[in-house]
Each structure stands twice: as structure tokens, then as C-alpha cells.
Amino acid sequence: MNEKIGVIGGGQMGSQIAALAAMAGYETSLYDENKENLEYRFKFVENNIKNLIDKSIYSKDNLDAYHNNLELKYSLDEVVDDKSFVIEAVVERFDIKLEIFKKISSFMQQDVVMATNSSFIQASELSKHCDYPERFINMHFFYPPIRMDLVEISYPDNVSKNVLERTKTVSKNMGRSVVVLKKETPGFIVNRMLAALVDEAYELYDEGIAEFEDIDIAIKKGLNHPLGPFELSDYSGLDIHYYAKLKKFEESGDLRDKPKAFLKDKVLKGDLGVKTGKGFYKYNKE
Ligand SMILES: NC(=O)c1ccc[n+]([C@@H]2O[C@H](COP(=O)([O-])OP(=O)(O)OC[C@H]3O[C@@H](n4cnc5c(N)ncnc54)[C@H](O)[C@@H]3O)[C@@H](O)[C@H]2O)c1
């Protein structure tokens, strides 16, 4: 494995993306600005892998690779030091992602891939403000990455062919099915389709047509979906839905894109879904 991978952001996604990289045999580093969260997530993913060994989804060798190939880092400089491939998975905020990429693109080696796992922000939106725009690409995993077998790749027109090919190779070596979009679009394929469903569910709830629990039951029973739209929102994180809608609203000015007041209230209260123990439903904190 010739790439050395640095993952920035060790939350729900980043911690598991780093695990996939380490289990695939890549020398991997993981950094989060919240040290406590970083260490908690490392243990949490370790326990997940152990559970998945019991279900014969992973092996003891995978767990050993997780331990041997993954190092936690405590600064941005350290996580990218010596790396050939960077995957950013911090909170879904454009300003924060941009600050990170501006900083690292200014000092990193010329052939380093700069991938973002953002759900809605396109690589070109970041790359146009940074050095070496031809190195930027979207590499979109699904929650939980160690279980969900898909990476959507999309790229700005000016991306180098080498960056695209290396991103495909890393995704495939992580054991993931890969789809490559022909054009950039916020939300890629899956989230664009999902947004249509979730938006309509929020609209039904906002109009007082049904309780959210009943909307979830209707979708699960009537459409045979494994999770209802409110359960799904809780799993992916209400902040992600909120910031994605806010960005769309700021761009379009269309009131139909404005995040619903009930969503904003929950996000401001810190009720972000499964990761905080409360969203639409209550959970034992992960
Ligand atoms: N949750 C999903 O279902 C899902 C799926 C695909 C993609 N994504 C994308 O992945 C990214 C992360 O989402 P998540 O669900 O892991 O969120 P999360 O809230 O679990 O994790 C985000 C992490 O970023 C860290 N962070 C914030 N600012 C930072 C900084 N400046 N430097 C380093 N770390 C910083 C936070 O401490 C936190 O641990 C988002 O861009 C999101 O859109 C999420």
C-alpha cells in the first residue's frame, strides 16, 4: 500500500473512515480537535469491529490491522505530516472545512490528494479558494462507513486524472463499491434522492398532518424502508440536515429551502440525534 492516509475529524464518520483505511492496510493517522472525543471514538470503533468479528463480517486480522496501522494525532500539522492522501471529515460547516484546506494546501507536497467527505459541499467550492485546486475531490462515505458498502466520488472539472484514479483505488481497497459522478452536484446521488423524501416528511410534520413517529411507521411499512425519515435524520445527525438546508437557502433565497423551525430548535439545543443521545427520538448515548 503506497498511500499514507491522514483523516481530519474523528467523529462518527472520520473515526470509521480511518478504521477502513487502517484495515485495508494503509498507514493511517486520525485527528480531531476534541481529544476526548477522538479517544472515545477510537474505543467505540474498536468495540464495533469486535462485534462485527462475532458476526463474521470482520476478522481478527482486521482488528490487528486497526491497532497496528492507525495512530491518533493531536494536531492538524501532525495528522497530515508525511501523508499522500488526506480525507477531511469534520463538521459540515463550509467555513471550518475551508480554513483547514486553505491551511494544509499551502504547505503540503504537490501530489497529495485532498478529499472531503462532505455530504453537500462540492470540492470545487473549496478548491477555488485554495492552492493546488487540481488535487481536490469529493469522497463520500455512508454512515456507518465500516458497514455501508458505497463511496460516491465526484470531482471538479480541473481535477487531475491521477487524483481521480488514486481516489478510486483507495475506495476499492477499502472494500467499497464506487460510483463516479459525471458532474458535481450538492448531495451527490443518494442525498439528493434522500433529501426529497426527508423534506416531504418534515413538511408533513410541520403542517401537523401526522406525528413524526407515524410518518416513520408509514414509510417503513408502506414503502418497506428499513428506517423512517426521522430515524434516518437522527442517525446521520440533525446538524448535517440543518447546515445543508441553511446553505441551500442562503444560495437560493427560496423559502422552501429554509430549514424548518423545529429542526433549528433541536440543533441549537444540541439535540443532534443518536450521537448526542437525543434528536427526534431518545437514545442511549453511543
Ligand atoms: N453522518 C452521516 O451520515 C454522514 C454521511 C456522509 C458524510 N457525512 C459528512 O461527514 C462529515 C462529518 O460528519 P459526522 O457525522 O462525522 O459529524 P460528527 O459531528 O460526528 O463529527 C465531526 C467532528 O469534527 C470535529 N471537528 C470540528 N471542527 C474541527 C476542526 N477544526 N479540526 C478538527 N476536527 C474538528 C468535531 O470535534 C467532531 O468530532 C460532515 O461533513 C458530514 O456532512 C456525514
Image: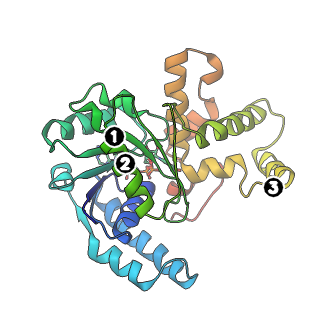
Residue 161 - label: 1
Pointers 2 and 1 in contact (C-beta within 8 Å):
yes
Could you tell me which residue is drawn at 73 percent across and 51 percent down? 228
Assess disc 1: are there few (<14), some (14-19) or many (≥20) residues with their C-alpha within 10 Å of its C-alpha. Answer: few
Where residue 173 sits: x, y (%)?
41, 63
Where residue 192 sits: x, y (%)?
61, 36
Disc number lying in front (3 or 2): 2
Count of marks overlaid on the render? 3
Above or below: residue 144 compared with residue 259:
below
Label 1, label 3: how far apart the Cα atoms are: 40 Å
Could you tell me which residue is drawn at 38 percent across and 34 percent down? 123
Could you tell me which residue is drawn at 22 percent across and 60 percent down? 73
Pointers 3 and 2 in contact (C-beta within 8 Å):
no
Where residue 29 sits: x, y (%)?
26, 61
- Secondary element at image label 1: helix
Above or below: residue 109 compared with residue 53:
above
- Residue 11 in sight from this viewpoint: no
**Amino acid beneath label 3:** Asn
- Which residue is labeled 2 in the image? 165
Q: Earlier in the sequence, mark 1 or mark 3?
A: 1
Above or below: residue 26 compared with residue 190:
below
Horizontal side of residue 283 vs 91, given as left or right = right
**Amino acid beneath label 2:** Glu
The answer to which image quadrant residue 209 occupies is top right
Pointers 1 and 3 in contact (C-beta within 8 Å):
no
Label 3, label 2: how far apart the Cα atoms are: 37 Å
**Amino acid beneath label 1:** Lys
- Which residue is labeled 3 in the image? 224
